Image: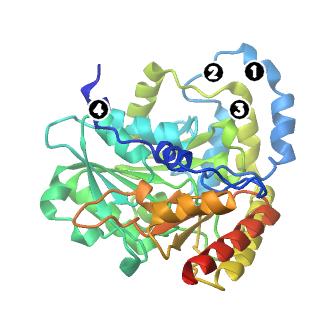
């Protein structure tokens, strides 16, 4: 058995289930689940139409590289979205469809890591737990980079010693960030690209929330955009991961892509050929239509914008609230210990949210997620508003003690 399995920590939702098991919610309150980042918005009609009209694809073995039509749609989208040099994203060389960012973000570490005893994979803290698991099972050691309120939850890259950068084989980044909503500036992205060139490590940029933002005039920057700004139009050592789960509200389709350095893409394609992770032709057809269309994405953002405006207005009655520039999470500071806050909120008001300390590790003397909870505004406007009202009532009861 792989000995590295013993290094894995309990997944956040396993810990949450254990926390909730100790108490019973009130029967007179409807259940509200805002712990999981699972979009509840209806899938756009174009997805349903594409799936039903391509069911014959179920009788065909898919290829690892996916269809030319899908790769072309992806190349066109990523080029336009991040203002890349026309022709620099070759559908055959720089794009690889994947079964959602989670699967690919995990697998890429297995592909790109040389499992030496001193191998390091760097990642933000707080963070998406897949990064840690990917590092450990690839035979590397995770190195966490804290992001705190003092730095708007941007990881403190300047605090990383040069000796650590020299041992780094892969850097995971996420912008807009899960769970905090932190958004990297283009200048910060460029700085990280320069570091990757200097110390010869790869960057895996998890950008699955890139299309959930609140100012239509300021979409979040991406890693490939930073490369282009530096004149690095071959995207050396850089891979960007995108998904339809959040952008198009189809988490069940498990559809995304990785784009960037053609040499890394070629190696990853080889790995995935043996991995047996080709995307279903039916999903490919639906994905092609989704990447071609922006209307449904704009409407999707409007729904999130309304939820954030209304929920933040309610919560601000009792606690400071910072509306994130991206993602559909609220990273809320708690008046008591975060796990206790989540437990009591469930017990008294039947609202489930995720303790921030479950999504971070204690390193360099602190747990940067402690004292926060992640609230996923994925349900309807009405449900999210009801949850906010219950949270306000709960916080008022704490303050009254």
Give the residue furthest to the front.
Answer: 401
Apparent side of residue 334 relative to residue 196 in the rendered image (left or right): right
Q: From the image, which quarter does the C terminus lie in? A: bottom right
Q: Residue at x 54, y 36 (%)?
A: 92
Q: From mark 1 to mark 3, how far is it between C-alphas?
A: 9 Å
Give the number of marks: 4
Q: From the image, which quarter does the N terminus lie in? A: top left
Q: From mark 4 to mark 1, how far is it between C-alphas?
A: 40 Å
| Secondary structure under the numbered disc 4 in the rendered image | helix
Residue 225, percent from left and from top: 49, 63
- CB atoms of marks 1 and 2 within 8 Å: yes
- CB atoms of marks 4 and 2 within 8 Å: no
Per the rendering, the mark at residue 283 is 3
Apparent side of residue 309 relative to residue 327 in the rendered image (left or right): right
Q: Earlier in the sequence, mark 2 or mark 3?
A: 2
Q: Which quadrant of the view contains residue 54? A: top right
Per the rendering, the mark at residue 6 is 4
- CB atoms of marks 2 and 3 within 8 Å: no
Per the rendering, the mark at residue 62 is 2
Residue 260, percent from left and from top: 46, 48
Q: Earlier in the sequence, mark 1 or mark 3?
A: 1
Q: From mark 3 to mark 4, how far is it between C-alphas?
A: 35 Å
Per the rendering, the mark at residue 57 is 1
Q: Marks 4 and 2: which is nearer the front?
A: 4
Apparent side of residue 389 relative to residue 220 in the rendered image (left or right): right
Q: Is 385 located above or below residue 47 in the figure?
A: below
Q: Residue at x 63, y 21 (%)?
A: 62
Q: Marks 2 and 3: which is nearer the front?
A: 3
């Amino acid at each position: 058995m792989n000995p590295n399995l013993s290094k894995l920590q309990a997944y956040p939702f396993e810990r949450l289930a254990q926390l909730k098991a100790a108490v019973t919610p009130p029967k007179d309150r409807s259940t509200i689940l805002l712990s999981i980042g699972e979009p509840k918005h209806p899938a756009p009609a174009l997805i349903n139409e594409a799936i039903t009209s391509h069911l014959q694809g179920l009788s065909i073995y898919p290829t690892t590289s996916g269809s030319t039509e899908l790769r072309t749609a992806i190349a066109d989208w990523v080029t336009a979205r991040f203002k890349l040099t026309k022709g620099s994203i070759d559908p055959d060389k720089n794009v690889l469809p994947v079964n959602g960012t989670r699967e690919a973000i995990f697998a890429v570490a297995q592909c790109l890591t040389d499992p030496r005893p001193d191998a390091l994979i760097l990642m933000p803290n707080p963070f998406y737990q897949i990064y840690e698991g990917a590092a450990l099972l690839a035979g590397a050691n995770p190195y966490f980079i804290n992001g705190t309120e003092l730095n708007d939850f941007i990881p403190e890259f300047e605090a990383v010693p040069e000796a650590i950068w020299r041992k780094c084989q892969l850097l995971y980044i996420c912008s807009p960030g899960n769970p905090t909503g932190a958004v990297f500036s283009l200048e910060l992205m460029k700085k990280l690209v320069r570091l990757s060139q200097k110390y010869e490590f790869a960057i895996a940029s998890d950008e699955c929330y890139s299309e959930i933002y609140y100012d239509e005039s300021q979409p979040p920057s991406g890693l490939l955009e930073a490369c282009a700004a530096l004149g690095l139009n071959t995207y050396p050592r850089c891979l960007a991961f995108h998904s339809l789960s959040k952008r198009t509200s189809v988490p069940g389709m498990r559809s995304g892509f990785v784009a960037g350095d053609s040499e890394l893409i070629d190696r990853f394609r080889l790995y995935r050929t043996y991995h047996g992770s080709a995307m279903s032709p039916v999903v490919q057809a639906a994905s092609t239509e989704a990447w071609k269309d922006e209307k449904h994405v704009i409407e999707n953002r409007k729904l999130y914008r309304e939820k954030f405006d209304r929920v933040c207005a309610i919560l601000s009655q009792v606690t400071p609230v910072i509306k994130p520039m991206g993602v559909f999470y609220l990273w809320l500071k708690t008046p008591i210990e975060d796990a206790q806050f989540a437990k009591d909120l469930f017990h008294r008001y039947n609202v489930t949210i995720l303790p921030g300390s479950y999504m971070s590790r204690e390193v360099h003397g602190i747990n940067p997620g402690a004292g926060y909870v992640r609230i996923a505004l994925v349900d309807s406007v009405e449900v999210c508003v009801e949850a906010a009202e219950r949270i306000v009532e709960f916080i008022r009861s704490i303050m009254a003690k």
